[in-house]
Image: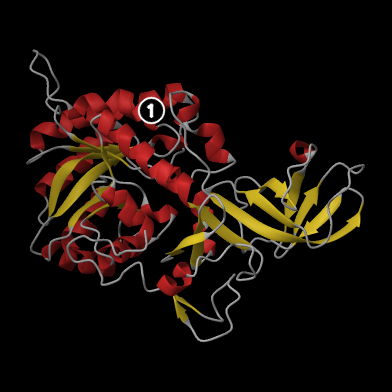
Amino acid sequence: MADGLGVPGAAPEAAQDVLIDWSTRGFLHTGEPVSGRDFVAARHSLFDGSFTWPLLVVKRSALDHNIATLAAFTRSHGLAFAPHGKTTMAPAIFKAQLDAGAWGLSAATPGQALVYRGLGVPRVLLANEIVDSAALRRLAYEVERGLEFLCYADSVEGVRILSDAAGAVPFRVLVELGHMDGRTGCRSLTELLEVAEAVRRSPGVELAGVACYEGTRSGPAEVRDTLRELRAAAEAVSPYVDGRLVVSAGGSAWFDLVAEELAPLAHPRAEPGRPRSAGALVLLRSGAYVAHDDGFYREVTPYNRIEGELLPALEAWAQVLSVPEPGLALVGMGKRDVPYDIDLPMVRTVGGRTPGWLDRARVVKVQDQHTYLRFPPGEEGVRPGDLVSFGVSHPCTAFDKWRVIPVVDDDYVVIDLIKTYF
């Protein structure tokens, strides 16, 4: 994964410009700066003194497995895949996803979209409203230079902003469907059609299709309702779309239902009464799948309902600093190091062991520099200096904490480095 993106316009050596020196967090390198390529060639072990703690690492076998698994899922259902790059903002991972067949990448902000463009990503879906006129003018310039770009609108005013900032090549717009108490998106099909009509009559914009995010719904019945409403919206706007209709949905929690409800739109059928939107480009946008986790996504993954699995690819390593009272270890890892916004980290090993009481050990608090690890008070074997490994919950708030992340094989030999662009 250490090569550049390998797509037209890619920034030279986009994923290789890692330089390891004294300032590289987690690395114990005090000599002359060394290139990432040379560091990897040295085949360091995670435990040979080349690193300091805490440290986040990526397991290569799990990462490769997850990328291959979702690529196979989308192919088998006739979906196109635009994985959400905001999870990792890592060109090495972008390349692996594109090499596995991804149509392009999804972004949440114009800044992310412009980073993708700088790294040579050929197609970008900005899966959000964009009302930043300065950023839009820059994106219009990139569209004129060949970037294939899609973005959202959920209001007539948003359409006007897009129209005013457009260049010689129109912005291709997906009208977003939302739901009450949800995030962005039109709150009804009627409202969506009004926005679609505004796109149709405005210069500088072109109606490409519809989109939604079903992940804020509370369960499978509501998710299906939203997806079926999106399908109705697709069928309603289809006659007014020049070229292939685009329909997009899908986080990492419900992509099985997205496939069930929307994949039929991707398959033209000859029987009477087929929807006019048949043959659509159905874009799935899952992002967290790529690293999966040991918490939230482990509980909500569709692979709890369908055949297959995703594997947690992230591990955090830190040392026990103190065992000041029975059953409490203070570990040198904090909010700057690991995600804590959904679930706290989950302990995996202590001192290289998996003692019988490990399933009763719990992280109960994470502060700026300390993690409170509770374990059964009568048990022994947790000592200052012990290395503890943790799984994390919510990978989207893990990668952003690290500028350079070692990639390890199953024996914890460093075989690659990931640079992030947050």
Front residue (pair 413, 116): 413
Front-lying residue, 319 or 278: 319
Image coords of residue 183 (percent x, y)? 42, 43
Question: Relative to residue 256, is residue 194 drawn left or right?
Answer: left
User: What amino acid is at disc 1?
Assistant: Asp
Q: Position of residue 369 (x, y in %)?
A: 71, 65
Instruction: Say whether residue 228 is visible.
Output: no
Q: Residue at x 7, y 40 (%)?
A: 243
Left or right of residue 392, residue 107 in this image: left
Quickly name the residue at label 1: 256
Q: Quadrant of residue 416?
A: bottom left
Tell me what residue is drawn at x 41 percent, y 27 percent: 223
Q: Is residue 118 above or below residue 83?
A: below
Classify the position of the C terminus by image quarter. Answer: bottom left
Residue 103 appears in the figure = yes
Q: Position of residue 363 (x, y in %)?
A: 74, 48
Q: Is residue 89 left or right of residue 148?
A: right
Identify which residue is drawn at 43% across, 23% down.
306
Name, please, the residue furthest toward the top. 272
Q: Is residue 233 above or below residue 103?
A: above
